[in-house]
Amino acid sequence: MTQYDKMTKTPLVKLIISLGIPTTISMLVTSIYNMADTYFVGTLGESPQAATGILFTLQAIIQAIAFMLGQGSGTMVSKALADRNKEEASEYVSTGFFTGLAMGTVLMVLGLIFLNPFMRFLGSTETILPYARQYGTCVLISCPVVMGSFVLNNNLRYEGKSFYSMIGLVTGGIINIFLDYLLVIVCEFGVLGAGIATAASQLISFCILLYFFHKMGESSIRISSLSKNKKVYATICKVGFPALVRQGLTSFSGGLLNNITRPFGDAAIAAMSVANRFSMFVMCVGLGIGQGYQPVAAFNYQAKKYDRVKRGLLATMAIGFCMVACLAVPSIIFAEQIVYAFQKSEAVIKVGVLALRCACIGTMFMPLSIPVNMLYQSTRQVKISTFLSMLRSGLMFIPTLLITTHFWGLLGVQISQPLADVMTGLLAIPFVIHFMKKKFLDVDTQVK
């Protein structure tokens, strides 16, 4: 079966699951090794553990730029392959990849030069700063390969080869967990050890993903395919802009959350770090299935198989909800045990348990919003997709955080993101209905 036939003729549920499960496993393992940093560093105390929460915001900044380039180029690669144009596909993936390496290098240099003010801007207190510097230095040094990895990962997914992207990310994740134990616990390198483990595992993932793309990719990454046409760069950025908005707002709101939580002490920052990291683990199954739907939507939309796009959306929402609920409900029940596993401090547990329970409730509304957001991005409807990307971490979360914290203090910090998740899920419903009722003409759809 050719790639075209696979994407346009395979039964939808089977296709979405086959593409979504490897992506879900990749994201779960990535989330697990993020939590491994939090766990192992947590053995060093509240302030070191809080540093991993501070740097989570920096990682979101890196991901924001990388997702823009990866999903922007990946969407156009799917379009080109649906048109059976491999040269155009190679131009887009090569341009996205080398641009990612260049932007990662710029961010690394600027971040290292302005390391102290950058860490403070992200919400570091003076007691957290020494640990944030150590961990942040490693994260920044690995920035170019992280950017390259995300571009490779997204393009493999958009070509319908998410299994190979899973191998690269899972291998790096497992190595990170092993190195965390070795460097933090055995060698007693502290926070610096966790940072080295993260950077080393990212480099290994990058090498594996690059190898698989070279061997398995429908398109090719070549210097000679790097575009000299400004329109190619503009198209990648425009199509990927919703991902930049989504991840960029996640970064900004994470920094805002850290700064608003700072007056409540290092224990509160550490507690929110644990709750956010673990709820991200729960959320990953919804994100993974949603990302499995992206190449299905992009490919079939370009092939004018509009009914498959619509039915695929409903299937993705149903599968995503079932999978998220299977993790969220036990997490709500055993929230105290989960927080205790990461940090034994009573102050952290007191704040973290309620925060985690509320966060897990919020994640069950995300299968309403994630697939429809990815649908509009994959079908190159940039304006609607950008608006949907702004909801969760921007238009809903930031006002909710400011209002609830003003009236209820620390309780407002704990409940703000879950409330935003509920509202975002409900607001996505009209956009689902609009797309399901829409009549399509049998013409090529341009970026708009």
Image (cartoon, helix red, strand yellow):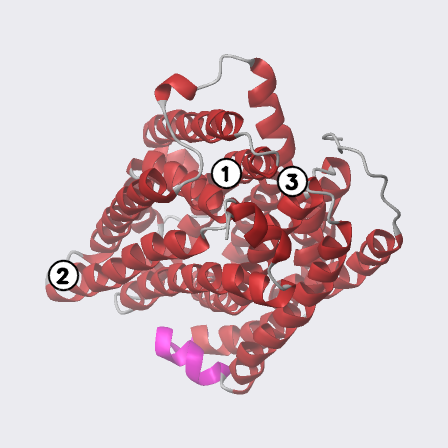
Sequence-wise first label, 2 or 3: 2
The residue under label 3 is 242
**18 is higher (above) or lower (below) than 77:** below
| Callout 1–callout 3 Cβ contact below 8 Å | no
Span shown in magenta:
335-347
Q: Is residue 342 among the parts visible in the rendering?
A: yes
| Residue occupying the point 69% across, 50% down | 375
For mark 1, give the secondary structure: helix
Mark 1 to mark 3 CA distance (whole Å) = 12 Å
The residue under label 1 is 70
Residue 407 position within the rendered picture, expressed as x and y whole percent measured from the top left = 73, 63
**102 is higher (above) or lower (below) than 12:** above
Q: Circle 1: is it few (<14), some (14-19), or many (20+) Cα within 10 Å?
A: many
The extreme bottom residue here reads 333
- On screen, residue 407 versus residue 181, left or right, reads right
The residue under label 2 is 188
Q: Circle 3: is it few (<14), some (14-19), or many (20+) Cα within 10 Å?
A: many
For mark 3, give the secondary structure: helix
For mark 2, give the secondary structure: loop
Sequence-wise first label, 1 or 3: 1
| Residue occupying the point 51% across, 59% down | 19
The residue nearer to you, when weighing 383 against 420, is 383
| Residue occupying the point 71% across, 59% down | 313
Q: Main secondary structure of the magenta part?
A: helix
**149 within the magenta span:** no
